[in-house]
Every structure is written in C-alpha cells, then in structure tokens.
Amino acid sequence: MLSIVRHARTEANAGGRLQGRLDLPLDDVGLAQAALLPSLVTDIDRVICSPLSRARQTASVFGLEPALDDRWLEVAYGPFEGHRIADLPQDMWQRWVHDIDFAPEGAETLRAMETRVALALDELLEEAADRHIVVVTHATPVKAAMAWALGVDVRIAARSWVDQASVTRIVVRNGRPALGAFNLLPLS
C-alpha cells in the first residue's frame, strides 16, 4: 500500500499563498497536525519525501529516516511563489490549472509534474504490493497520485481539494493501482 501524505500547515498555507519550491517550515498548527498522523498511518515499512522542510518535518513523525526524492516536489510556481492565488491574473491562473501543457514563463506545467510523479509511483508499484510505503509530499503531487491510481490525467486536480496533513491511500491489486481512500484526516 502507498499512503500519500500532504505536509502539514505552514504560515504560507494559513495565508493562502502559493509555496511551490519555497522552503518553509511548519507553523505551530502544522506541528500539531503532523503529530496526529501516526494515529492514522501505522505499520510503515519505508518513508519517502520531498526534500523541502515542510515535508521533512511532517515525515519525521513516522520515526523512520525518509529517503528524499525531488520527484515529489510541489509544482514550481516560478515568479508566483509566495503570492496569493486571489492576487494572480485570473485568466492566466485558470489556463494554468485547466491546460496541463501551459505554464507561465519560469514555472512548471501540470504535465511535467504529473510525469515525474507517475515515474516515481511506477517505481514503487511492485514494492507497494506487499509493503506499506509512506510518501510525504505536497497538494498537487497528491492529486497527481490520485489521478495515476484512477488511470486519468491530472486535469482532475482542478476538481479536487487536498487538506493539509491528509492521507490518500493507493492499494495494489493484481499489479495495478487502485484508489483506496482520498483526503483522510486523523482524529484530533
């Protein structure tokens, strides 16, 4: 099984700001959110995570040294990192989230992110058939993992919401991924 975990809250999350590749730590709420995750995610064999601080801090609650993998980084928002979505040119933002081959200059397309996440998942598929692998990542890669499990493209991302410190489960049946659960939150 794969448990795909979105990192817990940061100050930028609280302010509705795009983080992308900004390396920000968890805030106090995020630390409390992360501390609850082991109640929901147990019997772990391996942990993998994005190299950004917020993902590493979240992964630390599982008690295993995580393998860092750049393929689990958030979409690169380029010049828009640190900005509120509400402050972006809305025609550009709508095109970006609906046209997976479009990105403003200096940013990453959803297709590029989807491709790197799918490659990482393909490599984990066989192992996840009989081991529990936890991946700590960011909102958009979680959505890409969900799309991969469902066999659809990442256009579904615009129609889904991923909470901070949530868990998406992908099970492997007959060598194929299946979405087992989406956006689970630990009980507080």
Image (cartoon, helix red, strand yellow):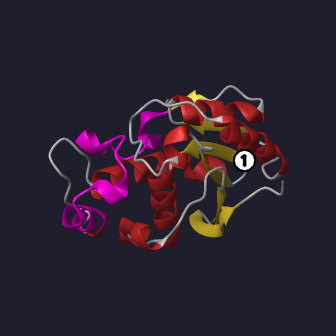
Q: State the count of labels.
A: 1
Mark 1 sits on what residue? 131
Q: Residue at x 61, y 34 (%)?
A: 26
Left or right of 28 on screen, residue 22? left
Relative height, residue 20 to residue 66 (above, below)? below
Q: Residue at x 29, y 51 (%)?
A: 112
The answer to whether residue 43 shows anywhere in this view is no
Amino acid type indicated by mark 1: Arg
Q: Position of residue 25 (x, y in %)?
A: 56, 30
Q: Residue at x 48, y 61 (%)?
A: 143
Relative height, residue 78 to residue 160 (above, below)? above
The quarter of the rendered structure image containing the N terminus is: bottom right
Highlighted range, magenta: 69-97
Q: Position of residue 19 (x, y in %)?
A: 42, 42
**For this rendering, which residue is in front, 119 or 48?**
48
Q: Position of residue 55 (x, y in %)?
A: 57, 36
Left or right of 24 on screen, residue 76? left
The answer to whether residue 183 shows anywhere in this view is yes
**For this rendering, which residue is in front, 93 or 89?**
89
Element on which disc 1 rests:
loop
Q: Is residue 88 magenta?
A: yes
